[in-house]
Image (cartoon, rainbow, N blue to C red):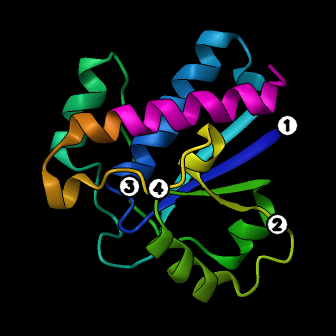
Amino acid sequence: MTKILFVCHGNICRSPMAEFVMKDMVRREGVADRFEIASAAVSTEEIGNPVYPPAQRVLNEHGISCKGHHAHQMTRKEYEYYDYVILMDAMNRRWCDRIIGEDDQNKVSLLLEHAGIHRDVADPWYTGNFQATWDDVNLGCKALLEELLGD
């Protein structure tokens, strides 16, 4: 089983979008039983909060539910458990390093790197543009899934 943890600052917008988009993709591919997918935050600011309502709306518009999600902060134990720790932006990497120390198992990457793009996933918290985030998340998750399935 391949275990993936998506991580962003607060775990209420980008990382849960990636979590639920990827869960939907593996379900549609018929390989959901081969994956364990979750998300977390690098900060403590939003712990316990659900997915931010505009992010929920974008997911719902595409038939994807995020019901039951509550933000939590990533732990070193999760780093040990998951095969891949996929970050939404470079600032997340700095915060993640504080939590895990050195990425000695080479598990940490940025989502869009899997699509050959070297920039952050658009942050809707500052722009309000949840469509741009949706587009980035879909692009990155599709490329990551293709990579993992060997396509």
Query: Label 1's element?
Result: loop
Left or right side of 117 for 66: left
Tell me the kind of residue under disc 2: Asn
Label 3 Cα crowd, 10 Å radius (few <14 / some 14-19 / many 20+): some
Tell me the kind of residue under disc 1: Met
The residue sitting at 13% across, 49% down in the picture is 128
Residue beneath label 2, please? 106
First of labels 3, 2 by sequence position? 3
Comparing marks 1 and 4, which lies closer to the viewer? 4
- The Cα atoms of the two marked residues, 4 and 3, are separated by 27 Å
Residue beneath label 3, please? 70
- As drawn, 57 above or below 95: above
Left or right side of 140 for 31: right
Comparing marks 3 and 1, which lies closer to the viewer? 1
The residue sitting at 67% across, 11% down in the picture is 29
Start and end of the magenta stretch? 135-151
Tell me the kind of residue under disc 4: Arg
